[in-house]
Amino acid sequence: MTDVRIVGAGMTDFGVHDRPLAELFADAAVDALDDAACAPADIDAFYLGNAMSGQTDGDTHLAPTLASHLGMAGIPCTRFEDACATSSNAFSHAVRAVAAGQYDTVLVGGVERCTPATGLGTDEMTAVFASAAHRQYEQPTGLTFPGVFGLLTTRHMHEYGTTEEQLAAVAVKNHRHGTLNPRAQFGTETTVAEVLEGPVVASPFRLLDCCPFSDGAAAVVVTREDAVDDPESAPRVAGIGHATDAVPLATKADLTATQSARDAAAAAYAEADIQPADVDVAEVHDCFTGAEILAIEALGFVDTGEGGHAAVEGTTALGGEIPVNPSGGLKAKGHPIGATGVAQLVELTDQLRGEAGERQVPDARYALAHNLGGDAATTLVTVLDGGVSA
């Protein structure tokens, strides 16, 4: 098995895009190819993350369509669907294929359109999102994902005393980070008071506790380490963990913890041969403010029950002990389902290259991406190493 490095990264702004999926993805992919100094002919395979184009755009045979649009017809193309963890799963498989010697260089990306630009209203898109919940036991009850994570967070509040003010502090932090990211959907700050004054979406979440519907695309190019001329600009994929938990929600052993994240993190740390304390910067799946609290506990950044205090105390802010979501996270950067996982890796590639601008974490070497899907049923955790030696 050979080591694998990210040699190119690109993404669009996240927000509203009234453009075909092929054009939207091409913007990110061409930037990634240019960044890698690759031509389409240099790509051996294409792994795509897209969760819902059949429902939103009437387009289900998407991977070869996008490859053709990019001048890559003829190479193997595979589309992945794993709810919100879709493009992280595509990335994991691409890395394993390169490490095993099946391919030398692979384009990995994700694209999604989720805003009213698709022609679907909020109620219709909410139903599309909810199709990632259990078909027999959850969807018929009307349970959507604000409710799913509201239940998990409410139980955490009951067990550990987490408060609505602590949830609001997560939103405040990530919106502040989002002001430093020109690609973010929301580049404005908010306050704890503004969050707490918002309308309830699903208790305990108010409007600003929830991430938005977004359109966008992201792409990276991965290749064999021995083909890389400048390792300092090409983060090494040090470890990947992929785990699942019980579905439906009611069958989970512990509603205060995301077990799949614990298991995926343990596997990623073991492969990377690091500990949580070694991580310098992280992008985690904060689809709701409570989800970030659950994530940082599962990842071992803080003790169980202490996640609510971390945002209030500045532990997870830029300049804090472990900066979390310097991009603004899903909360402020946006959440185009199939693009989110790779977008996290684009941000972390920028961080490890020292190219993140005002949101740069100084001297970052190890970076971690945490991307979950469904009702915390699927999680992928990826560790990147920005060091020049393996």
Image: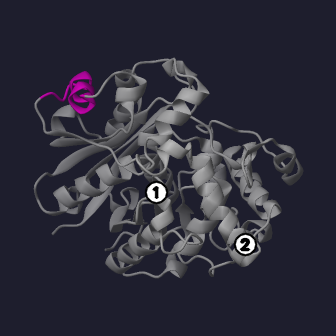
In the rendering, at what x and y percent does residue 126 appear? 55, 35
Q: What is the magenta segment's predominant secondary structure?
A: helix
Viewer can see residue 315: no
Whether 286 is drawn above or below 11: the answer is below
Residue nearest the observer in this picture, 142 or 210: 142
- The span picked out in magenta is 61-73
Whether 54 is drawn above or below 96: the answer is above
Q: How many marks?
A: 2
Q: Residues within 10 Å of mark 2 (few under 14, many from 20)?
A: few
Residue nearest the observer in this picture, 186 or 223: 186
Task: Tell me the residue that label 2 is attached to.
Answer: 158
In the rendering, at what x and y percent does residue 372 appear? 46, 57
- Quadrant where the image shows the N terminus: bottom left
Is 352 left or right of 307, judged from the image as shown? left
> Residue placed at 22% from the left, 46% from the top?
106
Tell me which corner region of the image, top left, top right, bottom left or bottom right, holds residue 100: bottom left
- Is residue 67 covered in magenta? yes
Task: Tell me the residue that label 1 is attached to.
Answer: 372
- Is residue 299 covered in magenta? no
Marks 2/1: CA distance? 23 Å
**Which amino acid, mark 1?**
Leu
Which numbered disc, 2 or 1, marks the residue that appears first in the sequence?
A: 2
In the rendering, at what x and y percent does residue 364 appear? 53, 67
